[in-house]
Amino acid sequence: MMRIKEHPILDFTKERKIIRFTFNGQEVFGYEGDTIASALSALGVKQFSTSIKHKRPRGFYCAIGNCSSCHMIVDGVPNVKTCITLLKEGMKVETQTNKGVLYDLK
Amino acid sequence: MILNRDLVIIGAGPSGLCAAKMAAESGQKVLLIDRNPQLGGQLIKQTHMFFGSEKQYAKTRGIDIAKKLIDDVKNYPDLIEIWDNATVLGLYPDKVLTVLLGETYRKVQAQAIIVATGASEKVLAFENNDLPGIYGAGAVQTLMNVYGVKPGEKIVMVGSGNIGLIVSYQLMQAGVKVLAVIEAAPVIGGYKVHASKLQRLGVDIITSCTIKKALGQDKVESIITTRLNEKWEEIPGTEQEYDVDAVCIAVGLSPLTNLLAMLGCELKYISELGGLVPVLTNDYETTIEGVYACGDASSIEEASSAMVEGYIAGLTASKKLGKVHPDYDDLILDFRKQLEVLRSGPFGEKIRKGLAKLEGVRVGC
Amino acid sequence: MLNQKGYPSPEQVKTKFPDVKILVKPKAIVECYEKIPCNPCSTSCPFKAITIGEDINNIPIVDFDKCTGCGICVYSCPGLAITVCEVLDDKIRFKIPYEFLPFPKQGEIWSAVNRKGEVIGEAYIEKVTLTPRQDKTQLVQVLVDKDLLYEFVTIRSKVYE
């Protein structure tokens, strides 16, 4: 488990609501306040996408919504910046292995 | 439909928040936009006490400075409108912004714009530098200090500037083992007090040393480092392998000037300021009238300077729109003095040199 | 070594200490070797014993006549570069800043550590304070052996050895 339980400066002991979601079809959970990327990291998931051409594994790099390395398919929508997108109940999160396919906004 | 707004500030980090505060104090209405779910920019992960003087909240932890600045801004609900989770997608010469606010697309016509978009972490070229588990140091700081998640158990930090040193210390506080801090230059880049804190913890700092390659199948499992000679060439036979499950890259920041470039503001490459930076007047106005830039988006410095620059840009942009702060002259004078002092020591030499180069460009054109 | 490794040489360390006779009373040892823009040590001192001046890049100067060894500067220094030192008959008493888990507790024996991070002896934890004003930086008062005057800088839990 990668969650920090005790910290000399910060308080991570507050009870937080469990948020259930799926990662590549598997049922998993994170906590309220997590981004998709932090919830996956806490589960030990390091690979979020692959490079478009050579399909090399990619994780997140910048965590500020800038570098595109964390793009995933969320609820069918590709190129979601998972490092700045908050986790929501029932989200369907998938590893992205292409440059993303056009979709219709709701 | 186009929404009309007077002053739009892009980025609610230390600089953008301070700009918004000064604008509101001037009586200027503001739309403050940030793409993150929380305001505060990179302050929200800075668990260490800040340097500088009381005027820049020295000895207060960054996380608490963020709270103060956010409270300041929320004190003006009638003047400051806040859009979080809002990414500015485009910025056009007639000062029209296109914004993805949550899942809705908005167009905003602004009268003046302050770009306080901050910076992004630089990458370093080495074999397999794209393996998952290799992170920007700031990303790791966000992951552990904002979300309470450790990036790994055993880490090597690449880069000994203040970010590298501070994040190493914070990794240790989070219970992560920092195997070494390596630095390609022959001397430590950041403040020695930060380096001393690490040495006391038994974390070795190795200068004239760089990362040669990372190894691993679908994530980083180990790295090979090599020592460098005075010409920055690899010294054969000095390779060392470290078993790691994460690597932090802390080799500097680049100003995020994409939006300024899209607008057509003149940019100049000045390595001392972090790369491509906007050409600015003394009032932090770019070469396009009514468009301002401050903080790391205008030059890479400490957060203390970013705050003061934000104050100035907030004042000058509001004045342009006809709202003059009652203490305008005194405040401007004081803020300029603060910047001068922050940049006056040996650590300010690089920034002074860079700003002098930029000044040359400005006067020349 | 400061520029390459981050720890000062023994000679540099000694420049920050007053004469041992002065240390019969507790005094602040400000290990700030480099000009950086920072002045909380000076502004936090209630006795005006630490001077930096107009230019906040100046290196702090301690007036040991005015310093009472209260320890406020110890947790006010953003660089955690200050300790308070007092030479007793058979031991030396230090007050140090500490920001790690586990927290030390009164009566415990921890390892005494030098500036390179090496264990150099033992430290008896005399007192630990953490008031809201300290903002999560603990002030730990310890006793160490007399020969560690210029060596000791921090403590480490024995759990880690």
Image (cartoon, helix red, strand yellow):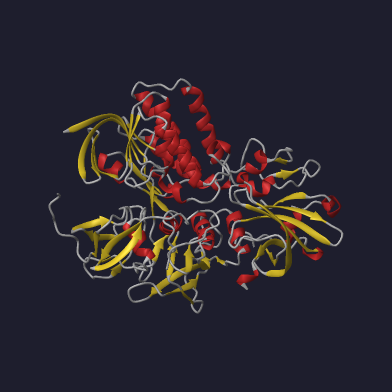
Q: Position of residue B79 (x, y in %)?
A: 35, 28
**Total labels drawn:** 0
Q: Is residue B192 left or right of residue B168?
A: right
- Do we see residue B299 in this rendering? yes
Looking at the picture, tell me which residue is in the foreground, A89 or B309: A89
- Do we see residue B302 in this rendering? no
At a point 45% along the width and 72% down the height, the residue shown is B244
Query: Which quarter of the figure has residue B188?
Result: bottom right
Query: Which quarter of the figure has residue A20?
Result: bottom left
Q: Quadrant of the N terminus of chain B?
A: top left
Q: Is residue A24 left or right of residue B281?
A: left
In the displayed structure, B152 sits above or below B78; it is below
Q: Position of residue A5 (x, y in %)?
A: 48, 62
Q: Position of residue A66 (x, y in %)?
A: 32, 53
Looking at the picture, tell me which residue is in the foreground, B311 or C75: C75
The residue most toward the bottom is B237
At a point 66% along the width and 51% down the height, the residue shown is C32
Q: Quadrant of the C terminus of chain B?
A: top left
Q: Position of residue A96 (x, y in %)?
A: 23, 64
In the displayed structure, B324 sits above or below B89; it is above
